[in-house]
Structure formats: structure tokens, C-alpha cells
Amino acid sequence: MDNELTKTKINEKTGIEYHLEGDYYVPNIVASKQEKIVLNKYGRMRLKYLKEHKKAEYTIMFMNGTLNTHLKEIQETADSRVQQIISELKAKSDLTEDMKNTDMLYWVGTMNSIKAQAEEIVFSELIYV
């Protein structure tokens, strides 16, 4: 009977219940089920940033079960924002679709530059904040 009493224990300060495994008390904490998502470039970058620079926010979102929702929202917003900025920058440049056929290297170089600019803006607005 005395052995049964020591198999579980509740910390009165935190209210966390512990169970005995071998010689150690282990907390009975279970992470809630989260929806499965596939992270793209922006989702992975945001996750890495949270883990390395915003550890408290990462832990809170993980424990609350809101991390995957947050990452999904960030990557969807980042994708649409990059496309929007690319469209705006492309309209401001002297780039035309005819240049794909006439001056392909110039067109590719300019498009790469526009995409890099758009991604840098999104990084500072969404990913690294």
C-alpha cells in the first residue's frame, strides 16, 4: 500500500502530477495533437529563428499547440507577399516578356534580383521578427 502512494506525486506549487519511473519522478505532461503540415522555405526559416532567438515564444507556442498553425500562417502570408512584391517590382522595372526571347540573360538576372529584393523585404517583415 505504501508503495502505491509513492508511484504518483503532485507538486502543490505547480499542480503538475509526476509518476515514478525507476528511481526518478517524471512529469505527466502530454503535448496536444497538432495538425500535420509541410513546411516550405519560409516556414522552416521561421521555425529555426524561433528556436534560436525566441526560445520562450517557441516553447509557449509548442506547449499550447499553436506552433504549427503559426508556421502555416507565416508561410502562406510570406508566399503571397513575395508574389505581390515581385509583381510590383516587375511593373516598376523596364522588364517585358519579350525580353525572355531577345535578351534572356538580362531577363533572368533582373528577375533573380527582383526575387531577392522581395524575399529580403519578407524576411524583415515576417520571418525575423
Image (cartoon, rainbow, N blue to C red):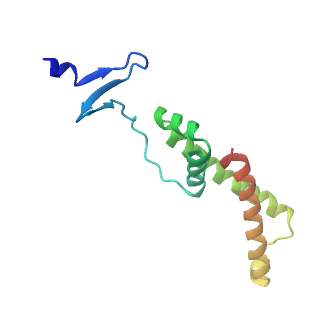
Residue 45 image point, x, y percent = 60, 54
Q: Quadrant of residue 14?
A: top left
Residue drawn at 81 percent across, 60 percent down = 89
Q: Is residue 57 above or below residue 80?
A: above
Residue located farthest toward the front when viewing the structure as drawn:
23
Quarter in which the C terminus is drawn: top right
Residue 39 sits above or below residue 59 on the image: below
Horizontal and vertical percent for residue 29? 36, 31
| Quadrant of the rendering where the N terminus is positioned | top left
At horizontal 16% and vertical 18% (from top left) the residue drawn is 2
Q: In the rendered view, does 88 fall on the left or right side of 81?
A: right
Q: Nearer the viewer, residue 38 or 87?
A: 38
User: Vertically, is 16 above or below 103?
Assistant: above
| Residue 82 seen from this side | yes
> Number of callouts in the render?
0
Q: x and y percent of residue 115 in the render? A: 73, 64
Residue 93 picture quarter: bottom right
Image check: 110 left or right of 79?
right
Q: Residue lying at the far bottom in this picture: please name it.
A: 102
Q: Nearer the viewer, residue 48 or 125?
A: 48
Q: Nearer the viewer, residue 125 or 58?
A: 58
- The residue lying at 80 percent from left, 79 percent from top is 106
- Does residue 98 show up? no
Is 8 left or right of 14, judged from the image as shown? left
Residue 52, x across and y down, in percent: 58, 48
